[in-house]
Image (cartoon, rainbow, N blue to C red):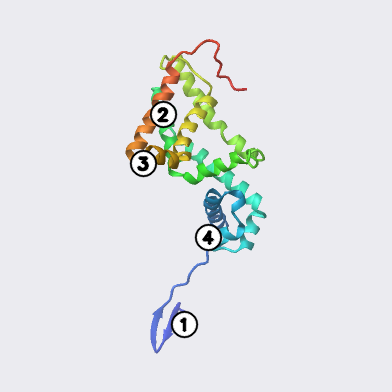
Amino acid sequence: MNDQGMATQGGSKRKYVRLKATNDPDETRADILAVAQEQFARHGYAGTTIDSIAAKTKRSKRMIYYYFSSKPKLYKAVLENAYRGIRVAEESIRLDEDDPRQSIKNLVEFCFDYHFERPSFVKMVMGENLNDARFVSASDEIKNLHFPLTQRIEKCLRKGYENGYFGRTCTAVEMHMTITALSFFNVSNQATFSAIFDIDMKSPAVCRARKQEILLAVLGRLDTKLDDGFSTEYR
């Protein structure tokens, strides 16, 4: 090899390419988190091992322990990263439309599509609920992440009610809960509904129809006055 970065063989010059090692800490951490989420979503917390994650990431167990110390800490980091992902994505939702009904439509479409396109996130949340939110309860970050969205929803609902677009209003938490529940259900019960009713729950036509049904249900909720004794306050 000469000093020009060339390898010589049999009197001829041959170019070589130096492969750069992927030692970027952020890239390594992100790769481990992505693979770990898929493994935890597929096999659950109990059924997932550091060995299986290491095999899928092509990184050593030692490397995983270096970044996350233990399986519980890795699982907690995966959950926090997953919730952080949806909260960051929610910043793109237009909730300041002139017509608040369009803002609600934007919220429904985002929530439905986000869950549909990320079944591993849905499975992670399902697993955490089966474990009584053991790790979510221990994460202040996850608890605090929802405030920006609920504040924006609250502003949208108030605007719609005060300007006559909505016949009644509700809390931002209730609105968030309703839309999330209906969007989540479309993924969590996808397999059973497809089998029982012979419906392809993943087809574009069915997804469009489901989004429309959710939007009608939510807007109907805002346009309907219920009995005065019915309270929707969450404290």
Q: Locate residue 60, reporting x and y percent.
A: 60, 64
Q: Residue at x 39, y 83 (%)?
A: 13
| Residue 200, numbered circle | 3
Mark 4 vs mark 3, CA separation in Å: 30 Å
Decide: is 9 above or below 217: below
Q: Position of residue 82 (x, y in %)?
A: 54, 44
Q: Nearer the viewer, mark 1 or mark 3?
A: 3
Q: Residue at x 65, y 58 (%)?
A: 65
Q: Which residue is mark 2?
A: 214
Q: Amino acid at mark 4?
A: Lys
Residue 2: mark:
1
Label 2 neighbour load within 10 Å: few <14, some 14-19, many 20+: some
**Picture layout, residue 193 above or below residue 169:** below
Is 6 located above or below residue 231 in the figure? below
Q: Which kind of residue does numbered mark 1 sit on?
A: Asn
Lower position in the chain sequence, tag 4 or tag 3: 4
Q: CA distance from mark 1 to mark 3?
A: 62 Å
Judge depth for marks 2 and 1 and give the one in front: 2
Camera-side residue: 195 or 175? 195
- Expressed as whole percent of the image width and height from the top left, the position of residue 170 reads 51, 20
Residue for badge 4:
56
Q: Secondary structure at mark 3?
A: loop
The answer, for residue 138, to whether it is visible in the render is: yes
Query: In this view of the protein, which residue sits in the foreground, 185 or 117?
Result: 185
Disc 3 residue type?
Asp
The quarter holding residue 209 reads top left
The residues bearing labels 2 and 4 have C-alpha atoms spaced at a distance of 37 Å
Neighbour tally class for label 3: few under 14, some 14-19, many 20 plus, Cα within 10 Å: some
* For marks 1 and 3 on the same chain, the one whose residue lies earlier in the sequence: 1
Q: Quadrant of the C terminus?
A: top right
